[in-house]
Amino acid sequence: MRPAHFSEQDLARLALSAQLKDLSEELRLAVAEPDGPTADGSGSVLAERLLRLLDDGVPALQDALVAHLRARDIPWAWIGPRTGLGQDDARARWGRSEPVHLADARGTAAALDEWYVRHAQLEPLAHVSNPVSRLLGDIEGDPQRCLICAKYAGEAVPAWAGRPQPPGGHLIDDGTWRVGHGPAGFWPRGTLLIESHRHFLGHAEISPDEATSLALLIRRLTDPLKEATGAPRVHVWSNMEGTPHFHTWMVPRVTAVPSGRHFIANPGYCTAVEAEEAVHAIRKALESHAGTEADAS
């Protein structure tokens, strides 16, 4: 039975969004898919797959789009020419289509919300937890949220905001600061993200104890980070532009990018495996430095 607040228009929009998601996922995977000869050696495996995808996916997407338009009472006179058909032919093709039925509309909306957020990049909707379901019926859009607090609360966040368990685990989690590797696809190996447990925005709101412990933490991490990565310099900055929660980046200059502003603009990236290996090396260097300091005292 259709939920009371999911109108026919809502269901048609959900079906359209689901088709778009499935097609975009297939196309995304094809970007890095290797090619090769077909079984009979006469063609391309990648081309064969893409052509099959277009043959099946585009008509299904067109069906979902027309259903969405008709649910919004868009006239056939507008739809026909834009689908390459006349008004009468478009009506004949889609006019008898059954209303969209989704077995679990609420679950579909929630799944689309999570998929969109996890794949979001720098668009404004990256900060919104319900980018798809906010379009439906009487569901209100969420206000922009703190992605760091949301991440540790178990909510879906964009990949560039990281995960509650970073690659290799947290190096430090002392109740005031969490230190882990930055999201692998967006930062070079060895990049450390320092996040405050307490929610506050910037340096003007940091407590004296937090300010002191942060300075000592950066000092403690710098040499082990350079030792583990071979970086001649470690760039340290905070701007809180990604999300309004205090965090500091420690980015080792490990790539061939020139130093200075060129490096800041494009510091590079790494794989999850490289990030885990870097964390392992940094953890060993931290332990070694801690032992040396203990012996010296």
Image (cartoon, rainbow, N blue to C red):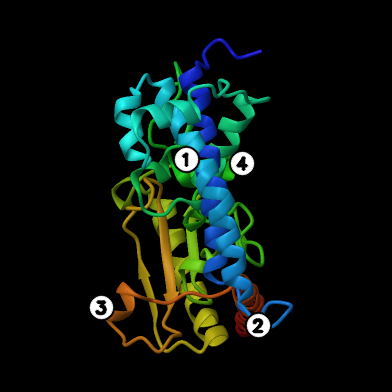
Q: Where 205 sits versus 285, above or below?
A: above
Q: Earlier in the sequence, mark 3 or mark 2?
A: 3
What is the secondary structure assignment of the residue under circle 4?
A: loop
Amino acid identity at mark 4: Gly
Q: Secondary structure at mark 2?
A: helix
Q: Is residue 135 visible?
A: no
| Kind of residue sitting beneath label 1 | Gln
Asked if the residue at tag 4 contacts the one at tag 3, i.e. Cβ–Cβ closer than 8 Å, the answer is: no
Instruction: Name the residue: 43% across, 70% down.
Output: 250
Q: Which amino acid type is marked by label 2?
A: Ser
Q: Is residue 27 visible?
A: yes
- Mark 1 vs mark 2, CA separation in Å: 62 Å
Q: Position of residue 265 (x, y in %)?
A: 30, 73
Mark 1 vs 3, N-terminal side: 1
Residue at figure coordinates x 63%, y 26% from the top left: 102
Label 4 vs label 2, nearer the camera: 4
Q: Which residue is mark 4?
A: 154
Q: Quadrant of residue 145?
A: top left
- Location of residue 125 (image quadrant): top left
* Image coordinates for residue 65, horizontal then vertical, percent: 45, 35
- Residue that numbered label 2 is attached to: 288
Q: Which residue is mark 3?
A: 261
* 155 or 32, nearer to the observer: 32
Do callouts 1 and 2 mark residues in contact (Cβ within 8 Å)?
no
How dense is the environment of label 1, judged by Cα within 10 Å: few (below 14), some, or many (20 and up)? Answer: some
